[in-house]
Image (cartoon, rainbow, N blue to C red):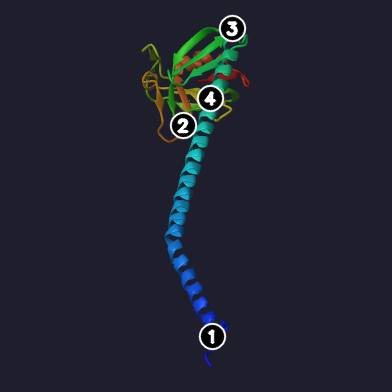
């Protein structure tokens, strides 16, 4: 008597076929998954670059905004001081001048030499006026080139602004060079001794000083 093949003999064949199909499908899908992985990496890189660009743009906008705000504040300070009826100092850092101004009128202007770090621009005030006795050993000249007699000793005064910048009299020959000397050291604004002496009686503690 012959026997017909049953499920017991067909089952392994079907299982083998299914396994082969599964493996073949898996192998066929490998390039696809690799492509997807590469695409995902590329997209991730693009997103990182965009994030970096966005952060840089944001920093640039913040810096520009801060610069604009500082400029506006400085312009407001200058405008407010321009017609101030009270006597005040106007210090032009870039042009190297110090002036006494009232009601928009310049009463006296003098060249200045800026040493150390640049003073803080904007509105300040005179925080202190100090005096000290010094020995004078060498002759000097004023801003017009006139010789100033040398005294054995003299009273040297200095003005300190709220940011620590010191205004004082010095050798006019150096003052005439003008400009900003950024060498390390304390913040100083040097006037000729004669200009400083002429300006000093008008200065009082708390007086406004506008720097730009």
Q: Label 1 to label 4, Cα distance in Å?
A: 95 Å
Judge from the rendering whether residue 111 lies leftward or rightward of residue 5; answer left or right: left
- Classify residue 185 by image quadrant: top left
Q: Residue at x 52, y 31 (%)?
A: 61
Q: Label 1 to label 2, Cα distance in Å?
A: 105 Å
Report the label total. Answer: 4
Indicate the secondary structure of the residue bearing disc 2.
loop
Q: Residues within 10 Å of mark 1 (few under 14, many from 20)?
A: few
Judge from the rendering whether residue 7 lies leftward or rightward of residue 150; answer left or right: right
- Which of the two discs, 4 and 2, labels the residue nearer the N terminus? 4
Judge from the rendering whether residue 65 lies leftward or rightward of residue 182; answer left or right: right
Q: Residues within 10 Å of mark 4 (few under 14, many from 20)?
A: few
Q: Label 3 to label 1, Cα distance in Å?
A: 121 Å
- Which of the two discs, 1 and 4, labels the residue nearer the N terminus? 1
Q: Are marks 4 and 2 in contact (CB under 8 Å)?
A: no
Disc sitting over residue 20 in the figure: none
Q: Compared to 7, does 120 lie above or below?
A: above
Disc sitting over residue 103 in the figure: 3
Q: Are marks 1 and 2 in contact (CB under 8 Å)?
A: no
Disc sitting over residue 117 in the figure: 2
Q: Which residue is mark 1?
A: 4
- Which of the two discs, 4 and 3, labels the residue nearer the N terminus? 4
Q: Residues within 10 Å of mark 2 (few under 14, many from 20)?
A: some
Residue 162 location (% of width, % of height): 59, 28
Q: Residues within 10 Å of mark 3 (few under 14, many from 20)?
A: some
Q: Label 4 to label 2, Cα distance in Å?
A: 22 Å
Q: Label 3 to label 2, Cα distance in Å?
A: 30 Å
Residue 112 location (% of width, % of height): 44, 19
Residue 29 location (% of width, % of height): 46, 62
* Disc 1 versus disc 4: nearer the observer: 1
Disc sitting over residue 68 in the figure: 4
């Amino acid at each position: 008597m012959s026997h017909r093949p049953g499920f017991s003999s067909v089952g392994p064949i079907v299982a083998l076929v299914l396994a082969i199909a599964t493996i073949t499908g898996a192998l066929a899908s490998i390039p696809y998954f690799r492509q997807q992985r590469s695409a995902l990496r590329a997209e991730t890189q693009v997103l990182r670059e965009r994030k970096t660009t966005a952060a840089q743009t944001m920093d640039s906008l913040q810096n520009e905004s801060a610069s604009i705000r500082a400029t506006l504040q400085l312009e407001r300070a200058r405008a407010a001081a321009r017609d101030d009826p009270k006597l005040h100092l106007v210090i032009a850092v870039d042009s190297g001048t110090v002036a006494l101004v009232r009601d928009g009128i310049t009463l006296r202007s003098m060249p200045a030499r800026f040493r150390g770090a640049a003073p803080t621009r904007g509105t300040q005030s005179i925080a202190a006026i100090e005096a000290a006795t010094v020995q004078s050993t060498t002759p000097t000249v004023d801003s017009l080139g006139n010789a100033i007699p040398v005294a054995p000793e003299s009273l040297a005064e200095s003005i300190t602004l709220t940011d620590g910048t010191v205004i004082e009299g010095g050798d006019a020959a150096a003052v005439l060079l003008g400009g900003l000397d950024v060498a390390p050291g304390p913040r100083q604004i040097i006037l000729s001794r004669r200009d400083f002496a002429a300006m000093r009686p008008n200065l009082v503690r708390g007086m406004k000083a506008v720097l730009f």
